[in-house]
Amino acid sequence: MNHFANVRPARVVEHIAIRRNADRPHKVGAVERRTLPAEEPRQRGGLGERRGAALAHLLEEIHLKPRDVDRVVVDRGPGLFTGLRVGIATAIGFSQALGCELVGVTSLEMLAGGAFDVGVRGTLVACVDGRRGEVFAQGFLLDDQVRALDDARVTTASEVATTWGTKGTPTTFTGDGVERYRAEFDAQSAFTIFDQVIPSVRAAIALGLVRPADEVVTPLYLRDADAVANFTTRKRPQ
């Protein structure tokens, strides 16, 4: 059962959280500090190279040396294929180079934790925009901690709204999947929308503090890559 707890370590522990956002693809964050955008995509160098430069820039800005980092926390999805692969590969390389621990969290957990941190309580459904008319969704119960009610799945906003609407329970919805298909959720009187487009970096690190380190972090894809889907569904010439 997934949960977040308000844990503060006895000593100062420095973590780095890495995540990718489709609209701002080069973004990193540090515990209870601030997030910094890296170079714009037009600049030279590959995505991994630019992200490495962003990490170096971030550490310099917050006056940390690479050896000061104890643990790397990475968003492992669900999300789009390339972004997840690059983000996780960067986190693995960074943690291995520094000899520090690595922890994977999900975008949906981060959204739930971000809502929890500002006082949202009760049933919450986190939705990440999956494009193709789909969302990645998962339900949580927020009381004294955050607990997962079901597994993450790929579905549609309409199906999510219908499923939770029939339960008759007051429910809060959050995430860029809710923002994109807002009309589906505004139609339900029992629904509340908590505006949160980008998953909370602070929530990621809070979870990273209490979760055991991962030997292997695997991307949470939930479906085939767009290239595979496009190839298998395209019209074949007659």
Image (cartoon, rainbow, N blue to C red):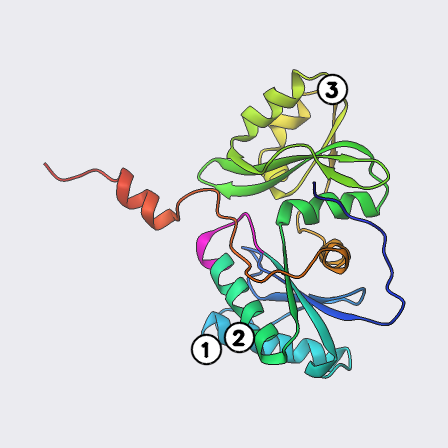
Whole-angstrom CA distance, mark 1 to mark 2, is 6 Å
Q: Which residue is mark 2?
A: 50
Position of residue 49 relative to residue 142, above or below, is: below
Position of residue 2 relative to residue 209, above or below, is: above
Label 3 sits on a secondary structure element that is loop
Left or right: residue 25 versus residue 234 is: right
Percent across and percent down for residue 93 are 54, 73
The quarter holding residue 140 reads top right
Question: Which residue sits at x=75%, y=53%?
Answer: 203
Give the farthest residue toward the right.
10
Position of residue 21 relative to residue 189, above or below, is: below
Which quadrant would the N terminus be assigned to in this image?
top right
- In the rendered structure, are the residues bearing label 2 and label 3 in contact, judged by CB atoms less than 8 Å apart? no
Percent across and percent down for residue 64 are 75, 81
Front-most of residues 16 and 230: 16
Question: Which residue sits at x=48%, y=47%?
Answer: 221
Q: Which mark is residue 45?
A: 1
Prevalent SS, magenta region: loop
Give the mark nearer the N terminus: 1 vs 2: 1
Give, as a three-letter code, the residue at label 1. Gly
Q: Which mark is residue 107?
A: none
- In the rendered structure, are the residues bearing label 1 and label 2 in contact, judged by CB atoms less than 8 Å apart? yes
Q: Residues in magenta?
A: 76-83
Question: Which residue sits at x=52%, y=30%?
Answer: 156
